[in-house]
Amino acid sequence: MQPTARFCTSADGTGIAFESRGSGPTLVRVGTWLTHLRHDADSPLWSHWLEALSAGRTLVRYDERGSGASDRDTERFSIEAWVEDLEAVVDAADLREFSLLGMSNAAAVAVAYAARHPDRVDRLLLYGGFAQGRLRHDTSPRARAEADLMVDLIRTGWGKANPAFRRIFTTLFVPDASIEQMTWFDEMQRISASPDTAALMRNARQRIDVLPLLPRVKAPTLVMHARDDAVAPFEQGRVLAAGIDGARLVPLDGRNHILLADEPAWPAFTRELDGFLGGGASAGSATGSLTARQTDVLRLLAGGRSNAEIAAALHLSEHTVHRHVANIYRTLGLGSRAAAAAYAALRGIV
């Protein structure tokens, strides 16, 4: 059954549509353009993503301001506004701790949120993202001219019945798509946002810069990026991984910005996803309903670490670690550190 969209209000009054699907530890997917809560489940481009992201997990996702089912009447697009939207969704969904997925421009939003709320994010996954938009990492006249051209194309052809202008974006995002997939993506551009709003979004994306925030991210981080991505250059994936302490970069062989279900990069992505976050369609639940961060705490606790040592290893406060330990005991029905250590050893966690 299709999840029911809920609505919350961002700090500036913009209404944001969000939904939850699946069960298990929570993964929040930061909103991007070119999605629509009411249409993505039947999409030949997004349906396999929804299935994989919600397998063994609770997936919380939302439509970006100005697009999809969220409020269209807004002209404020910036990292600050996007982070405020994410904060509103997290609060409305009553989430305390969760894994966070940032794709494309949303990777920068995820970085900014994780830097601002280190105790909330237990895992950070970045795919096809960038720390700096095109006009921040390339200041050449050619880059400026190309950026202006793309915005002009959006204003001219985004809302037209003829998809010729939008097909330019489609071939950039999914060059290996079938005719059916390209036709759907052409139409998604038209229905997801108005031409003027899409142009404002594009302009804001090109000016993103969260490079100074990368060293402030403390959550374990996995960066995945298609080697020949034409939307976000692979080098930007390197920048993200290099700037976040301990981050791991996984190159994917492909050129689609939105991975297709039948390309070799897709199973590689889902294997890394499940290995990093836990869960997955065929994964057993060795740790019951523990979050990824609680599993980290349990592993260190079982290894004989004190709360202070666990706090230092995971960049948390001792108060937060104490809360995690109490929640682990309650979730697993345990009464002592010795029992927790035995449980972890029995299930191969240590």
Image: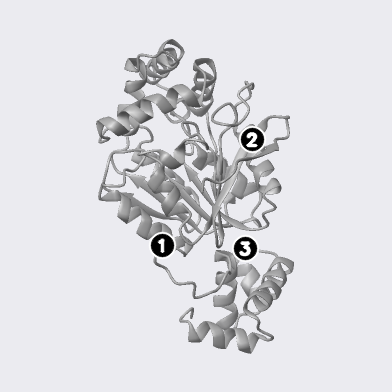
Question: Residue 82 has which mark?
Answer: none
Q: Earlier in the sequence, mark 1 or mark 2?
A: 2
- Residue 194 or residue 291, whichever sits in front: 194
- Residue 314 or residue 203, whichever sits in front: 203
Using the image, determine if residue 20 lies above or below residue 289: above
Q: Which residue is mark 1?
A: 281
Using the image, determine if residue 201 lies above or below residue 112: above
The residue depicted at 62 percent of the width and 73 percent of the height is: 310
Q: Earlier in the sequence, mark 3 or mark 1?
A: 1
Answer few, some or many: residues within 10 Å of disc 1's Cα (few below 14, many 20 plus, some between 14 and 19). some
Q: Position of residue 162 (x, y in %)?
A: 35, 14
Q: Report the side of 183 relative to 116 (left or right).
A: left
In the structure shown, which secondary structural element does the residue marked by tag 1 occupy?
Answer: loop
* For the residues bearing labels 1 and 2, Cβ distance under 8 angstroms: no
- Mark 3 vs mark 1: in front: 1
Q: Report the side of 42 relative to 106 (left or right).
A: left
- Mark 3 vs mark 2: in front: 2
Residue 129 visible in the shown view:
no
Q: Earlier in the sequence, mark 3 or mark 2?
A: 2
Q: Position of residue 220 (x, y in %)?
A: 52, 59
* For the residues bearing labels 3 and 1, Cβ distance under 8 angstroms: no
Q: As shown in the figure, which amino acid type bears the numbered disc 3?
A: His
The residue depicted at 51 percent of the width and 23 percent of the height is: 193
Q: As shown in the figure, which amino acid type bears the numbered disc 2?
A: Ile
Q: Position of residue 137 (x, y in %)?
A: 44, 31
Q: Which residue is mark 3?
A: 315
The residue depicted at 32 percent of the width and 37 percent of the height is: 229
Q: Which residue is mark 2?
A: 16
- Per the model, the C-alpha gap separating discs 3 and 1 is 31 Å
